[in-house]
Amino acid sequence: MLENVNFDEAKQSQLPLVELLVNMGYTYVSREQALAQRGGDTSKYLLHDIARESLMGINDYERDGENVKFSEVDVATVVDELEATRVEGLIDTSKDIFHTIMPKTGGKTIEVFADGKRESKSFRYVDFANGGKNNQYHVTVEYKVTGRETIRCDVVCFVNGIPLAVIENKKSSVGYEKAIAQLIRYQKPEFAQKLFIYPQLLIAADSTNWYYGTTGTPAKFYASWREKEQSEAEIHDTLHALIARPIESAVYTQMLRDLNGSTYNVQQLLQREVKPQDIGAYAMLRPERLLDIAKNFVFYDGIHKKVARYQQYFAIHKMLNRVQQIENNDSGVEKRRGGVVWHTQGSGKSLTMVMFVRALIEDPNIVNPRVIIVTDRKDLDRQIKNTFRNAGLKKSVVQATSGEDLLKRVRDKDSSVITTLVHKFQSASNKRAEFEDSDKNIFVLVDEAHRTQGGEANLEMLRTIPNACYIAFTGTPLLRDEKTRNKFGDFIDQYTIDDALRDGIVLPLIYEGRYVPLRDDDAQIDRRWDRVSEDLSAKQRYIAEKRANKKAIAENPDRIREICYDVQTHYVNRFQGTGLKAQLVAPSKYAALLMQKFFEREGKISSALVISDENGEIAEDDEHRQEIAAYTREIKEKYQGLQKYEESVIEDFISNPDGVEIIIVVDKLLTGFDAPRNTVLYLARELKDHNLLQAIARVNRLFDNPNPVEAKTSGFIIDYSENAANIDTAMQLFGSYDPNDVKSALIDVDEKIDELQERYAQLCKVFNGVALDDQALIEHLRDKPTRAIFDEKVNEFVKVFGECLSLQSFTEKFDRNSIDLYKSEAKKFHNLKRSAALQYGDRVDLRKYELELVKILDENIKAGAAEVLTGEIEITNREALNKAIEELGSDTSKAEAIAAQTERRIDQRREQDEALYDKFSQRIKEILEAMHQKKLADIEALKQLRLIDEEVEQKKDSDLPEAMRQKPGADILYRNLKADLPMDEEAYEATILEIDGIVRQMATVDWWRNFEAKRKMRLRIDDYLYDVVKVQRGIDITNEQIEKIIDTIVVLAENNHTVFGR
C-alpha cells in the first residue's frame, strides 16, 4: 500500500486544483464515497451509483410518439458492461471505449422489448448537447485503483461516473517531469493499466507547469496549453472570480481530510495569485471544454492515440467559423470563405487537416461536405492518403488514380475524402468538356500552398469546382516577394517556429558551417576554353560559362569526395550506432550518384540514393546523365520500379534503427518527409527561402529514442555550401512575420486582368500591319531590334497570364473563350519566338560547349580537405549566427568564405553593371591566387577581400572621372560602352552624359514595361549616335555597331530602371 498523503506537497498543487475544479462546476466526491461507489472494490474504476443515476437522466427513446426512459436494469447492465471491458491491448481497447462513449463511430445500443418484439435503441454515455449541461461532473482525490499493483491517482475528473481526466500533481521542487513518468508507469501491465482505457486526458502538473497527453503518449510528446480564445487579462479576471468563490465549509473540510490536512490550520485562499496550473485547468477541464476536447480532438492515428495540441484546437475552431461565413462572388454566386493556415513544420499540420476534415464531416450545419486534399508531389499524396486512412473517419478515403478517375469522382459527387495531385485536374481537362460542379460544400485543402497553386492545373481545378472553399496549409510563410502569388485570402491561424520552440514541440536546430577549398589552373582552363568556344559570341560564351561553372563546381569529383569523407567522419564519430540518422542534400543527381558510390566503396556507412528518373532523350556525349540513367535502370529492375525502391528505403530509414543510416537526395524528401529519427542534415548545395525552411525542418522533429546511448536533443545542419546567410534570412522570416502581409497582398483581380489585356495588346502591336501567316510573322522578325522587343513582350505576356491563371476569381471575371484564346495565343507566340531564334541564328545549342567546359574544369580544379568554418550555433540565436558568419576560423578560411559570399552577390548583380562587377571578380581572383601562391599573407588577403566586399556593396569605383561620379547612371554607361565608342576621353565623357540625358528624357513612368516608350527611346538614341557621334564627331562606327550600342544602353537602362526611370 502506498504511503499516506504528504499534505505539505498536496497543498502546493493538488489542493488549489481541486478547489478550482469545484468552483468550475465539479461536485467533490470524498475518498470514502469514491470507494463506496465501487462497492469497496478498488479493482473497479467507474463511480457506479453516479453513472446509473446520470445515465438514466440523459437517455430515453421514442415509442408511440412519447419519450420513454430505459429501465434501471438496462442502465445498470450498460454500466456493468463498460466496467467489465477486458483489456486486449491498451490502445486497441481504449479505442473501442472511445468509440463507445463518444458518438462518432460505433456507439452503444440497448435492446428493449416493446409491442411483442425486441428493438435496438441508441444509448448515450455523454450528452454533448447544450454545452454538456445535462451531464454530472465529479472530482475526487487520491483515487485508489488496483490492477496487478495498487496505485493512487492524485486527482480524477469524472463525467457521468466515467473517469475522463487523470491528473498527477507534484511540488515545483520535484517537477512535472516526475508526474509524467508516473502516469506512463501506471499504464504498464504490471500496475493498473485498465484504468487508462477510459480517460481522454492525462495531465502532469505542478503549480507553475501544466502538461497534457493521452493514453500511450510518450514523455517527449506531453505538451503545454496556451489559451487563444481570451486575452491573458480576461483569463486572469475570470480565474480571480472563480478562486474568490467560497466552497461550502463541510466540503472543504472533507477535502482537507482526504489530503491529510485536517490537522493543519488551513483556510481556502480567496485572493491568491493566479498560477499557470490554474490557467491550464480552466483552459482544459472546465466542463464544456473537456467535452469538446474529448469528443472532437482525441483521435487514433493507426496504432497511436493522440490528442490535439492547443494550436490545432484553436485553428480548427477558427477554420470551422471561417467556412460558415458566406460571401458572394462577382457573379452573385454564394461561396464559403477560405484562407491560409500557417503552422510551422513539425507542429502536426497533417493531423490538423485530418481533425478539421473530421469536424467538417460531423458539422450539422454543412450538408454532405465533400473534401479534396490537393498537393503537388507523389510522395506527399501517398503520405496524406495514409494519414487520413489511419484516422478512422466516417467517410472512406480514396486516392485519385488518374485525371479521369478524379473527374469521375467529382461528376459522381463521390462523398469519399479524395486525395490527389493538382496536375490531375489538368490531365482531366480534355475529358471535362463544359462540366463543372458549382456545389459550395466542396472543400479543397491545399497542402504546401506556396508550391501547389499556379498555371493551367490550377485553372482547370477552378473551372471544375468554381465555388469550392479553398483552405491553404503551409509550413513556411508566404514570402513577401510572393505577394502576387497569394490566392487564398488572409490568415486563419498562425503558429511560427518561435511558437513551436517555446512550446517544446520541435527541437532546436544547431548550425555548423564547413568549407571545401578549391584550387584551379586558370591559364590552362582559359587556353583550352578559348579554343573550344572560338565560334561563340561573347554573350553565348557568357551563358555557357555561367551554366558550366555552376555545374562543374557542384559536381567536381574532388569536391564531392572531400565532402563525403567529411560526412562519413562526422556521422561515424557522432551518431553511428545510436539509431539517429541523417540526410545528405546533393547539388545534382550526378553529384548524388558520386556520393552513393563513395559510401558504397568505403563501406563504413549504410546509405541509399533517392532521386527521380532521367526523362527524355539522353545525348551520347552526356556521360553524367548516361551514368544516372544506368543506375536508375538497375534499381528499377531490382525493385520493380523506383517507387517501390523509394518506399522500401523510407520504411527502412524510419523504422529500422540498424538499417539505412544516410539518405542521399537532391530535391526529393525535402518536404513533408516525417522521419523523427532523422537528426543531421548535411547540406552540399545552396538552398533558399521555402526550400531551405522545408529542408532544415526535416531534422527538428521530436524523437523518443529507445536507444539509451543518445537522446535526440537537437537537429543538426552541417553546411558545405555557405547557407549561413540564407538560413539567417529565412529564420527571421520563419519566426516573425507580419500577419498583415498576406492580407495586404490580396490581388485586385480587375487590375490584373487589365494588365493582362495591356500586355497582350502590346504583344500584338509588334505585328501591326503584318499578315497573320507564319512566314510573314517570321519575316517581320528579321530585324534584330524588333526581335528583341518581341521576345520581351512574349515573356511579359506569358508571365502575367500565368499569374492570372492561379487566381481563384480569374475564371469568374474572365470568360472561358477569352481564356482559351489567350492559352492558344501564348502557345503560338512561344513557338514563333523559338522558330525565329532558330532561323536568324539567335539560338545556338550551347549544351555541347557546356559539357566540354565541364570536362576542362573537372580536370583542372582540385579540392582540399573540408574545414570547419563555425562552431555549433543554434540558428534561432541570430546574433551568434551573424557573428559566426563574420568569424569563420582561420584567416584563409575567412578569406575564401568572404570571397565566395562576395562572388555570389556579384553574380546576382552582374547584369546591372557587367563592367564594374567583372572588375571586382578579377580583383578577387588575383587576391586569392596571390594568397594561395604565398605571395600575399592570409591576413592581408582577408583585409583586401573585406574591402572589396564593402566596395561591391557600395558600388565603389575609384577609376571613375569626376563628371561620372556626380551622375548616378552615367557611371554605368561610362564603364560598359568604353570598348564600343573609340574616342578621346573628353569626347567620350561628353557623349556618355548626352546619352544619359536622352535616356532620362525618354524614361516616362514605367517606360521599361512599355513597348512604345522603349521603341521611341531606341529611335532617339539611334538618331544621336548616327547624327552626332558618327557624322558630326567623325567616329568610325558601322550600323551594326550602332545597333549593338543601342541594345547595350537599353538593356542597362532597363536593368537599372530605378536609377534612370521615374
Image (tube, rainbow, N blue to C red):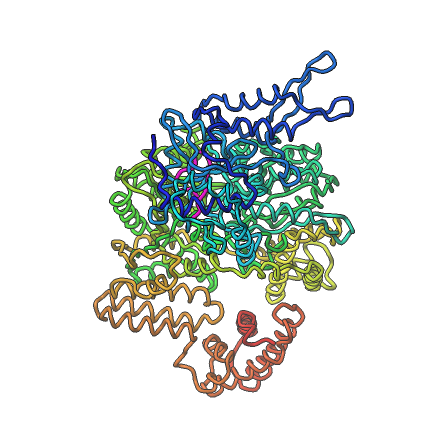
| Quadrant the N terminus occupies | top left
Can residue 218 be found in the magenta stretch? Answer: yes
Q: Please tell me which residue lies in front, 677 or 667.
A: 677
| Quadrant the C terminus occupies | bottom right
Q: Is residue 1052 left or right of residue 631?
A: right
Can residue 752 be found in the magenta stretch? Answer: no
Q: Is residue 849 in view? A: no
Q: Is residue 46 left or right of residue 925?
A: right
Q: In this view, does 857 lie to the left or right of 477?
A: left
In this figure, what is the number of numbered marks? 0
Q: Where is residue 192 in the image (x, y as percent from the top left)?
A: 40, 28
Q: Please tell me which residue lies in front, 428 or 174.
A: 174
Vertical comparison of 354 with 807: above or below = above
Vertical comparison of 513 with 52: above or below = below
Q: Where is residue 217 in the image (x, y as percent from the top left)?
A: 43, 37
Q: Where is residue 642 in the image (x, y as percent from the top left)?
A: 45, 34
Q: Please tell me which residue lies in front, 209 or 588.
A: 209
Q: Where is residue 889 in the image (x, y as percent from the top left)?
A: 26, 62
Task: State which quadrant residue 1049 falls in.
Answer: bottom right
Vertical comparison of 898 with 641: above or below = below
Residue sitting farthest toward the left: 934
Which residue is painted at 60% across and 83% down in the image?
1027
Q: What stretch is highlighted in magenta?
A: 209-222
